[in-house]
Amino acid sequence: MGDSVEDIKKHVRTYVMVFVVLLFLTGVTVGISYVDMGHTMNIVLALVIATIKASLVAAYFMHLISEKKLIYYTLLIAALFFIGLMFLPTGQSLDPIHL
Amino acid sequence: MLIPYTVKPRPDTGLINSKLGIWLFLASEVMLFGALFSSYILLRVNSVDWPVGSTILSVPIAAFNTVVLISSSITVIMAWASLKMGNLSKGRMYILITFLLGLTFMCVKAYEYNTKFHHGLFPSESTFMAIYFTLTGLHGLHVLGGMIVFAYFWGPGAKMWKTEPEHFTNRIEIVGLYWHFVDLVWIFLFPVLYLL
């Protein structure tokens, strides 16, 4: 990433644009929560929008769009374990508990 | 002890040490929050009767707090960009705004907790309330932690600018990375707890 004053100014414009998109998507999230599209569809849509928002924050605000390889590797390992964690609850179907 | 490579990148990693350090820390944070999200899924899938968040919690208040946190993410970037362009007073102003936005978030959160307590809704009330307080409580502690760091960099920590301006700028970038992560967690917490 360039570090000259001009470069920084250009980056700031991108950040502000991402910020506006994030605000818009927050509005969309709240808006669609009032529309009944079936329980599953509502959950899927809300999580899809949240993932888009999170990706925007990670890519632009956290500069992941242009980062060094070592950081990608670190996050790749974290992502794999995270996915494993998310699927861990499915294991309970083998021996269900009732809360 | 002096930590090396805080300004010049380390040749083998191509990174300043603090940046690799914060990303390793954030990777561990992913697992911390991941474990709780995983618990949430387990509790929800197994519950006989899971309430829709919006029937218990206030969506407008949480939406407002979402806007507050997203705004604080942009102000911390502006702080870094200002410092990068050599403007300390503007940088400090943005650090202060970020701190105040964090404070606003916490005040709103305190108001929310208080209303719940007034209605007798404690963590012991239900599985939903238990996971709600656990997730938002842990997230709130992270906001508080960030605020302490911002307060330090706005105050005594800013002295570093006189002797090592680049090092100070990098410090703001690093705390910014942490702050964006806290924002990112909230982006998921908001729909998961309040809307679904």
Image (tube, coloured by chain):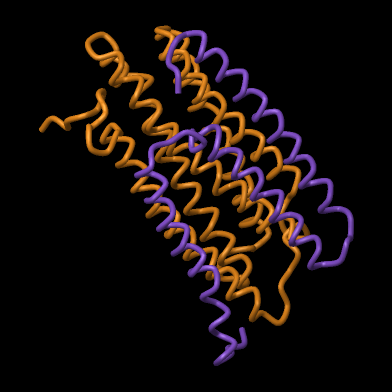
Chain colours: A purple, B orange
Q: Looking at the image, which is closer to me, A69 or A53?
A: A69
Residue B158 placement, left or right of A80:
left
Say if B52 sits above or below B114 in the image: below
**x and y, in percent, of residue B100 in the image:** 52, 26
Q: Residue at x 64, y 39 (%)?
A: B65
Residue B14 vertical placement versus A73 (above, below):
above
Q: Which residue: 58% across, 75% down?
A: B42
- Residue at image x 56%, y 65%? B131
Instruction: Classify residue B104 as left or right of residue A45.
Output: left
- In the image shown, does B195 or A12 lie closer to the viewer? A12
Q: Position of residue B175 (x, y in %)?
A: 39, 33
Looking at the rendering, which quadrant does residue B37 occupy? bottom right
Residue B4, located in which quarter of the rendered image? top left
In the image shown, does B131 or A55 lie closer to the viewer?
Answer: A55
Pick out the residue farthest to the bottom.
A95
In the rendered image, which quarter contains the C terminus of chain A? Answer: bottom right
**Residue at image point 40% right, 58% down:** A77
**Quadrant location, the N terminus of chain A:** top left
* Number of numbered callouts drawn: 0
Percent x, y of residue A89:
55, 77
Image location of residue B152, percent across then percent down: 34, 26
Q: Please state if A51 lies on the left or on the right of B135 as rendered.
A: right
Q: Is residue B34 left or right of residue B42?
A: left
